[in-house]
Image (tube, helix red, strand yellow):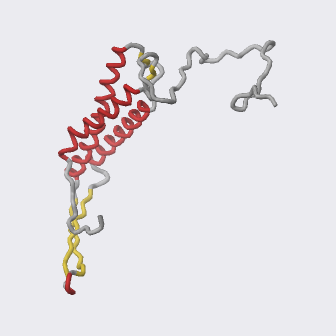
Protein backbone atom coordinates (compact mmCIF):
# COMPACT_ATOMS: atom_id res chain seq x y z
CA UNK A 1 0.00 0.00 0.00
CA UNK A 2 1.44 3.38 -1.00
CA UNK A 3 1.28 5.93 1.83
CA UNK A 4 3.07 8.65 -0.08
CA UNK A 5 -0.06 10.57 -1.00
CA UNK A 6 -1.29 13.61 0.94
CA UNK A 7 -4.82 15.01 0.80
CA UNK A 8 -5.71 13.13 -2.38
CA UNK A 9 -2.50 13.99 -4.22
CA UNK A 10 -0.41 11.00 -5.29
CA UNK A 11 3.35 11.14 -5.35
CA UNK A 12 5.01 11.66 -8.69
CA UNK A 13 8.57 11.69 -9.98
CA UNK A 14 9.29 15.38 -10.66
CA UNK A 15 12.84 14.89 -11.95
CA UNK A 16 11.93 15.49 -15.61
CA UNK A 17 9.17 18.07 -15.17
CA UNK A 18 9.32 21.81 -14.86
CA UNK A 19 6.99 23.64 -12.54
CA UNK A 20 4.86 26.44 -13.89
CA UNK A 21 5.52 29.79 -12.25
CA UNK A 22 3.05 30.65 -9.52
CA UNK A 23 2.10 34.10 -8.31
CA UNK A 24 2.68 32.96 -4.72
CA UNK A 25 5.54 30.67 -3.86
CA UNK A 26 5.81 28.77 -0.62
CA UNK A 27 8.15 31.47 0.70
CA UNK A 28 5.47 34.12 0.15
CA UNK A 29 2.66 32.15 1.78
CA UNK A 30 2.06 32.35 5.50
CA UNK A 31 0.75 29.32 7.30
CA UNK A 32 -2.40 29.88 9.33
CA UNK A 33 -1.99 29.13 13.01
CA UNK A 34 -4.59 26.66 14.30
CA UNK A 35 -3.87 26.94 18.04
CA UNK A 36 -3.51 29.92 20.36
CA UNK A 37 0.00 31.35 20.47
CA UNK A 38 1.72 34.40 21.93
CA UNK A 39 4.17 35.83 19.42
CA UNK A 40 4.68 39.13 17.67
CA UNK A 41 6.73 38.05 14.67
CA UNK A 42 5.20 37.45 11.26
CA UNK A 43 1.59 37.97 12.44
CA UNK A 44 -0.67 38.80 9.50
CA UNK A 45 -3.50 41.15 10.49
CA UNK A 46 -6.56 41.20 8.18
CA UNK A 47 -4.66 42.11 5.00
CA UNK A 48 -1.62 40.50 3.35
CA UNK A 49 0.42 43.70 3.54
CA UNK A 50 -0.33 44.30 7.21
CA UNK A 51 2.19 42.09 9.00
CA UNK A 52 3.31 42.57 12.60
CA UNK A 53 7.01 41.87 13.12
CA UNK A 54 8.07 43.79 16.25
CA UNK A 55 6.88 44.15 19.82
CA UNK A 56 6.08 47.82 19.13
CA UNK A 57 3.92 46.91 16.14
CA UNK A 58 2.09 44.34 18.27
CA UNK A 59 1.53 46.95 20.99
CA UNK A 60 0.13 49.34 18.38
CA UNK A 61 -2.08 46.59 16.93
CA UNK A 62 -3.27 45.69 20.43
CA UNK A 63 -4.34 49.28 21.11
CA UNK A 64 -6.02 49.61 17.68
CA UNK A 65 -7.93 46.32 18.06
CA UNK A 66 -8.88 47.21 21.64
CA UNK A 67 -10.29 50.56 20.47
CA UNK A 68 -12.08 48.93 17.52
CA UNK A 69 -13.80 46.46 19.86
CA UNK A 70 -14.76 49.31 22.21
CA UNK A 71 -16.13 51.30 19.26
CA UNK A 72 -18.17 48.27 18.18
CA UNK A 73 -19.86 48.07 21.59
CA UNK A 74 -20.48 51.83 21.61
CA UNK A 75 -21.95 51.66 18.11
CA UNK A 76 -24.44 48.99 19.19
CA UNK A 77 -25.69 51.16 22.06
CA UNK A 78 -25.74 54.31 19.88
CA UNK A 79 -27.87 52.52 17.28
CA UNK A 80 -30.38 51.48 19.96
CA UNK A 81 -30.55 55.05 21.24
CA UNK A 82 -31.03 56.44 17.73
CA UNK A 83 -33.76 53.90 17.08
CA UNK A 84 -35.67 54.96 20.19
CA UNK A 85 -35.37 58.64 19.22
CA UNK A 86 -36.47 58.06 15.62
CA UNK A 87 -39.67 56.17 16.36
CA UNK A 88 -42.40 58.30 14.85
CA UNK A 89 -45.67 56.47 15.26
CA UNK A 90 -46.82 55.34 18.67
CA UNK A 91 -50.01 53.34 18.96
CA UNK A 92 -51.63 52.02 22.11
CA UNK A 93 -53.78 48.90 21.94
CA UNK A 94 -55.99 47.87 24.83
CA UNK A 95 -57.50 44.44 25.14
CA UNK A 96 -59.51 42.74 27.86
CA UNK A 97 -57.89 39.90 29.78
CA UNK A 98 -59.41 37.71 32.47
CA UNK A 99 -58.52 38.82 35.96
CA UNK A 100 -58.89 37.24 39.41
CA UNK A 101 -62.35 36.18 40.64
CA UNK A 102 -63.95 36.48 37.18
CA UNK A 103 -63.11 40.16 36.73
CA UNK A 104 -62.02 41.63 33.41
CA UNK A 105 -58.83 43.70 33.29
CA UNK A 106 -57.67 45.94 30.46
CA UNK A 107 -54.11 45.30 29.28
CA UNK A 108 -52.45 48.04 27.20
CA UNK A 109 -49.63 47.47 24.74
CA UNK A 110 -47.52 50.18 23.16
CA UNK A 111 -46.60 49.72 19.49
CA UNK A 112 -43.95 51.95 17.91
CA UNK A 113 -42.68 52.18 14.38
CA UNK A 114 -40.74 54.30 11.93
CA UNK A 115 -41.00 55.16 8.28
CA UNK A 116 -38.93 53.19 5.79
CA UNK A 117 -38.09 56.10 3.52
CA UNK A 118 -36.72 58.47 6.12
CA UNK A 119 -33.33 59.85 7.09
CA UNK A 120 -33.31 58.06 10.49
CA UNK A 121 -33.92 54.71 8.79
CA UNK A 122 -31.23 55.40 6.17
CA UNK A 123 -28.80 56.33 8.96
CA UNK A 124 -29.70 53.13 10.84
CA UNK A 125 -29.02 51.12 7.67
CA UNK A 126 -25.58 52.69 7.12
CA UNK A 127 -24.67 52.21 10.80
CA UNK A 128 -25.84 48.60 10.60
CA UNK A 129 -23.54 47.97 7.62
CA UNK A 130 -20.61 49.51 9.53
CA UNK A 131 -21.45 47.39 12.59
CA UNK A 132 -21.55 44.19 10.53
CA UNK A 133 -18.20 44.94 8.85
CA UNK A 134 -16.56 45.72 12.19
CA UNK A 135 -17.97 42.55 13.74
CA UNK A 136 -16.50 40.44 10.93
CA UNK A 137 -13.14 42.23 11.25
CA UNK A 138 -13.11 41.45 14.99
CA UNK A 139 -14.02 37.83 14.29
CA UNK A 140 -11.21 37.50 11.73
CA UNK A 141 -8.75 39.13 14.11
CA UNK A 142 -9.73 36.64 16.81
CA UNK A 143 -9.32 33.82 14.29
CA UNK A 144 -5.63 34.66 13.93
CA UNK A 145 -5.36 32.77 17.25
CA UNK A 146 -2.76 35.28 18.37
CA UNK A 147 -3.21 35.51 22.13
CA UNK A 148 -2.38 39.22 22.32
CA UNK A 149 -4.93 40.10 19.64
CA UNK A 150 -7.58 37.81 21.14
CA UNK A 151 -7.11 39.51 24.51
CA UNK A 152 -7.40 42.91 22.80
CA UNK A 153 -10.73 41.92 21.21
CA UNK A 154 -12.18 40.53 24.45
CA UNK A 155 -10.85 43.32 26.69
CA UNK A 156 -11.98 46.03 24.26
CA UNK A 157 -15.46 44.54 23.97
CA UNK A 158 -15.73 44.17 27.74
CA UNK A 159 -14.50 47.72 28.37
CA UNK A 160 -16.84 49.09 25.71
CA UNK A 161 -19.77 47.26 27.22
CA UNK A 162 -18.86 48.55 30.67
CA UNK A 163 -18.52 52.15 29.47
CA UNK A 164 -21.53 52.34 27.16
CA UNK A 165 -24.18 49.83 28.22
CA UNK A 166 -24.88 51.15 31.69
CA UNK A 167 -27.10 53.76 29.99
CA UNK A 168 -29.06 51.04 28.27
CA UNK A 169 -32.63 50.91 29.53
CA UNK A 170 -33.81 47.52 30.64
CA UNK A 171 -37.54 46.97 30.33
CA UNK A 172 -39.00 44.52 32.81
CA UNK A 173 -42.57 43.37 32.29
CA UNK A 174 -44.01 42.95 35.78
CA UNK A 175 -47.02 41.10 34.37
CA UNK A 176 -44.77 38.37 32.94
CA UNK A 177 -45.21 35.23 35.02
CA UNK A 178 -43.08 32.80 33.00
CA UNK A 179 -39.43 33.20 33.90
Say which residue appears at 25% left-offset and 50% top-offset: 83
Q: In which quarter of the image is residue 164?
A: top left
Q: Is residue 12 left or right of residue 140?
A: right
Q: Is residue 142 above or below residue 59?
A: below
> What quarter of the picture does the C terminus occupy?
bottom left
Residue that protrudes farthest toward the front in the picture:
1
Say which residue appears at 21% left-offset and 81% top-offset: 99
Q: Quadrant of residue 131?
A: top left
Percent x, y of residue 94:
21, 74
Residue nearest the observer in this picture, 72 or 173: 173
Q: How many numbered badges does the structure rendering display?
A: 0
Q: Quadrant of residue 132?
A: top left
Q: Is residue 141 above or below residue 84?
A: above
Percent x, y of residue 64:
31, 25
Residue that protrudes farthest toward the bottom in the picture:
102
Residue nearest the observer in this picture, 2 or 12: 2
Percent x, y of residue 37:
44, 25
Q: In this view, does 35 lie to the left or right of 21?
A: left
Q: In this view, does 8 lie to the left or right of 115?
A: right
Say which residue appears at 30% left-offset and 67% top-offset: 178
Q: Is residue 42 above or below residue 139?
A: above
> What quarter of the picture does the N terminus occupy?
top right
Percent x, y of residue 22:
64, 17
Say which residue appears at 27% left-offset and 55% top-offset: 114
Residue nearest the observer in this picture, 36 or 26: 36
Amino acid sequence: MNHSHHMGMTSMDHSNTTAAPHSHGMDDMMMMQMTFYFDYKNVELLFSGLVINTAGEMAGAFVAVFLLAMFYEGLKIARESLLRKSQVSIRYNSMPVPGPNGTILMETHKTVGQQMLSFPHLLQTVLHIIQVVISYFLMLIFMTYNGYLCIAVAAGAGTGYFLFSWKKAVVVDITEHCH
